[in-house]
Amino acid sequence: MLTWLGDVLVVLPVSIAIGVLIGFTRHRWSPLLLLALGSAGTGLAVYLIKIMIARPRPLVVNAIVVEDGFGFPSGHSAQAAALYLMLGAFALRLLRTRWVRNALFAAAVLAMVVTGVSRVMLGVHSPTDVVAGWTLGASWTVLLLSLWLFAEHLPRLINSLVARKQRTTK
């Protein structure tokens, strides 16, 4: 089932496998750390928000799947957004061929969308639960990637500021 793309039983092994693969092939371990922080942070945020909001799941008479717990936000949708958008960003950053980068990013967005839509079709979430999950996962991913890029450029920025200061004091 496509809904499993956002389940922790898929998200965790995929995160570890791709993080380790990037680590060994590119000799960069920050993607593994980002994937771990993405998954853990998203999971924690979903858990806390579900407790605070305490919105019940939709009442569907002939639901295909029955789930317990609160519905808002969709954890599967949040995890799918966090993982697949992060992987899409890595593809854009690490791969050289334009069509491969674009195809992998499009596949990442498609995996996120399919996961969320499947949650609504199964009757375990309302559309607003899914949109909230996507927003949460995407926002957390954007924050982590922004901090990562800032940290990568920070030494150059500091050197530039120091050089500028030294030029003005001479």
Image (cartoon, rainbow, N blue to C red):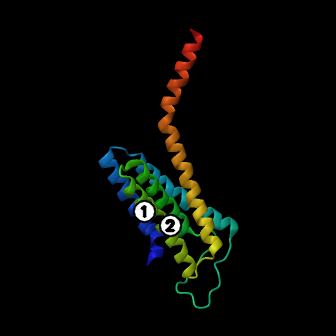
Q: Nearer the viewer, mark 2 or mark 1?
A: 2
Judge from the rendering whether residue 1 lies leftward or rightward of residue 139; answer left or right.
left
Upstream in sequence: badge 2 or badge 1 = 1
The residue shown at (39%, 48%) is: 94
* 168 is higher (above) or lower (below) than 86: above
Amino acid identity at mark 1: Leu
* 8 is higher (above) or lower (below) than 96: below
Res 88 quadrant in image: bottom left
Label 1 CA crowd tier, 10 Å (few <14, some 14–19, many 20+): some
Mark 2 element type: helix
Marks 2 and 1 sit apart, C-alpha to C-alpha, by 15 Å
Residue 15 at x, y percent in the picture = 41, 59
Can residue 142 be seen in this snapshot? Answer: yes
The residue indicated by pointer 1 is 12
Amino acid identity at mark 2: Met
Can residue 7 be seen in this snapshot? Answer: no
Q: Quadrant of the C terminus?
A: top right
Residue 81 at x, y percent in the picture = 52, 62
Residue closest to the far top: 170
The residue shown at (46%, 68%) is: 111
The residue shown at (48%, 67%) is: 110
Report the front residue among 13 and 85: 85
The residue shown at (53%, 54%) is: 141
Report the front residue among 97 and 149: 97
Res 13 quadrant in image: bottom left
Residue 38 at x, y percent in the picture = 50, 55
The residue indicated by pointer 2 is 112
